[in-house]
Amino acid sequence: MLEEKFICHHCVNDNYVSKHIRSNGDVTQSCSYCHRRRKNIPLEDIFKMMNEVFNYYYDVYEDIYGTGRGESAQEVICEELGVDYEVAEDIYSGLCEEFNDYYDYHAGVYNEDFLYRSKDYSSGELDDTWGTVTKSLLKETRYFNREVKEFLDSLFYDIDQLKTRNRDSPIKILSEENYLYRARVFEDLEEVKLALAQPEKNFGPPPSLLARSGRMNAQGISVFYGATSVEVAIAEVRPPVGSIVITAPFVPLRKLKVLDISSLDSLSFGSGSKFDPLTRQTSERAVFFRTLSRKLTLPAFGKRLDSDYLITQVVADYLGDRKKFNLDGVSFKSTQVYADDEDVGTGYNVVLFNMSSGVRYSSDSSRSFNVELYEYVDDDRYAFSPDIQLIVEEPKKSRSRYMGLFSSTNDTSDTLSMKTDGMVYHKITGVKFKTDKTAINQGSNIVKSTPHEPFDDMSDF
């Protein structure tokens, strides 16, 4: 039986445990290590807490081959609790006595021959629930699915209060300084000319009747898909070589609140102490948010597209509920470009929800431009020089000063204005790919045995 020892809050650097000692300890006796009469608790009270940290955060290995990959139990205790080695030795002895089953052939969980390595967190029940929710969406209506709502409530209820590891909010603000770009692919110049005649209408989000199903919207729900750089906008439409792409910039008319889905990879939960049960519980949520970030941004292919996008559409519908979150949209990194491409830069995708996707003049069928694609040089020679001019009718004289007050086509619900003087014509002359290569190995030949032929000549017998 170990000698009873006591430890004070000053001899433990972990904030959670130190606070626990201050709240639950007393000064009846002195600390066994600093010998000061500060608030302290019996050292054995920490044994269970330390054992839970080992069980949840560490894998144990018997270092048979002397690799040295990992840490001793004492080193882990020193690191996690922030205590001197003398304290760690006493805690280790207590763990051996209390939690080792000496009738076990392997001599328990704690042994001098064992090394301990941090284990990867698991998203556990959340990942299982995601699978269940996805299946239920394929069978039940998306708008009255209580199971889906409860699951999403449990994930996003405090999204506006969460912080990343850098102490940043996952919610970003886009202002008039943040241009959003859309790109359209064309096969020939005639198509280009028709589109440029009414650019707000043809480069803004499609009307509901023409809105096709996408990653963040169901069919018939119009949203704004854009990017914060021209290069990302072009990459997202995946134009073939020889095609034409027109990019158009849009400017927010008010500040827009956007949830950065990519930042879900680095959210921080709890106090950060591994001794804090809240940290332990929410670590699963942190891991699942990293998984969710990938699920919401990776492309789907072929027959799986509709079912894979179903859950991302439901998440977008849920986040787009202005009464609940007051969000205008979401942003995420592009999967069509790679981060170290100097030509692309640091742009990312932005999707504005239906209620925040209105573009000024996009519904005004009378607003049009004169389009000229070639400029006369001389001697019947023309140079390609796209040019657009807004067609403005002369204002009619009115007898009443009140006439014309309601003739404006600007909708107060519009959130974006297109910069018609910022459109750019791109001729796609090449496409760049990045691949991860794996050689296909050809092994030795497989000798196929020849079947026995039936006897057809009995003369040999």
Image (spheres, grey):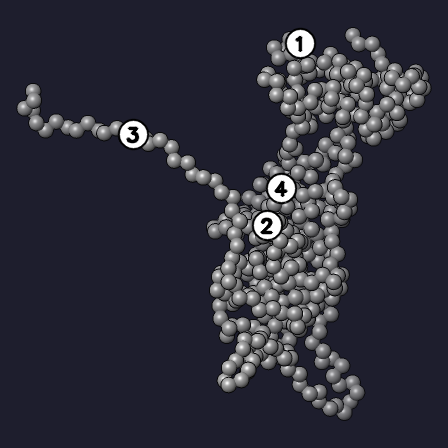
In the rendered image, the vertical position of residue 253 relative to residue 296, given as above or below = below
What is the number of the mark on residue 338? 2
Compute the Cα span from label 1 to label 2: 54 Å
Q: Which amino acid lies under the numbered mark 1 shown in the image of this protein?
A: Tyr
Note whether residue 43 is visible.
Answer: yes
Residue at image coords 57%, 69%? 425
Q: Secondary structure at mark 2?
A: loop
Name the N-terminal-most of marks 1 and 4. Answer: 1
Q: Is residue 140 visible?
A: no
The residue tagged 1 is 102
Mark 2 or 4, nearer chain start:
4
Which element carries disc 3, helix, strand or loop?
Answer: loop
| Placement of 128 over or under 77, stated as above or below | below
Q: Residue at x 81, y 21 (%)?
A: 84
Q: CA distance from mark 2 to mark 4?
A: 19 Å
| Amino acid bearing label 4 | Thr
Find the residue positioned furthest to the left.
459
The quadrant in which residue 276 appears is top right
Q: Disc number at residue 447?
A: 3
| Kind of element beneath mark 1 | loop
User: Real-space Cα distance between discs 4 and 3?
Assistant: 46 Å
Name the residue nearer the viewer: 296 or 127.
296
